[in-house]
Image (spheres, rainbow, N blue to C red):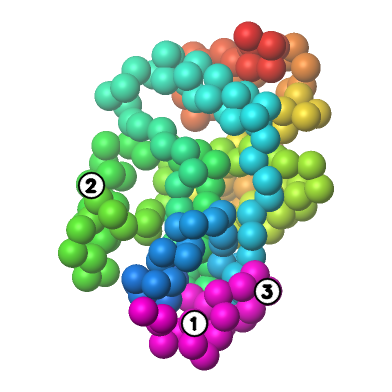
Amino acid sequence: MASSLTESRPFEPGTTGWTARDLDDPEIERQWSDGRYEIVEGVLTTMAPAYFVGGKSLLRLISRVVLHIGERAGSFATEVEIVLDEDRVVRADAAFLTPAEEQRQQQAALAAGRKDPVRTRILIPPTLIIECVSPGHEKHDDRTKRRWYAEFGVRNYWLLDPFKRTLKCLIYRDGAFHDDTAGQGNDELCPSLFPGLVLHLGEIWNA
């Protein structure tokens, strides 16, 4: 059965007027789930293609962080949909939530009237978001999402570029993201978010 929304407006990239609330419509949700979409300032957009090398490097990075901090400190998830506001619904390549933030997420879901908090997109700022940069889409991650995540209140934002073999770690301060640490190739990085963690970048690209 067609949705009243799709009868008046086709579910096609480039169409305008979309909001996070539209995703509550079962037919819209079905079409949304069949692809890789974001809502950018009310415009339905398709995401950059996902490459194997990007996913591989991202999982290596996550595994090294988890090995250092342990599983009780928090949890990572990949391909995380986040509602920044009504006109912006993004899909982050990875997000890290502490146990306290998971509880806040459940409370936010209930406060938003969600019947099933587990099946609710992220409504609160995660401690960390990681984006894996795809060729040709660098500005979306390094400019647009950088600004959006800062406005949303994300405390740490990491940009992983497996093609240029770089990792840039940003930290939120005074209303914007600032450089925390960055490196490339075989450099070693020590992000302040996880004290004592040493990231050997060569292992992320070549392990």
Q: Earlier in the sequence, mark 2 or mark 3?
A: 3
Towards the viewer: 111 or 196: 111
Magenta region, residue range: 1-19
Q: What residue is pinned by disc 1? A: 6
Q: Earlier in the sequence, mark 2 or mark 1?
A: 1
* Disc ID at residue 103: 2
Residue visible at 20% across and 58% down in the picture: 116
Residue 6 image point, x, y percent: 49, 82
Q: Quadrant of residue 119?
A: bottom left
Residue visible at 31% across and 57% down in the picture: 120
| 115 with respect to 35 (left or right) | left
Towards the viewer: 1 or 69: 1
Count of all numbered marks drawn on residues in the image: 3
Amino acid carrying mark 2 in the image: Gln
Residue visible at 53% across and 47% down in the picture: 92
Q: Quadrant of the C terminus?
A: top right
Q: Is residue 11 magenta?
A: yes
Residue visible at 31% across and 45% down in the picture: 101
Q: Is residue 178 magenta?
A: no
Q: Residues within 10 Å of mark 2 (few under 14, many from 20)?
A: few
- Residue 128 can be seen in this image: no
Towards the viewer: 170 or 21: 21
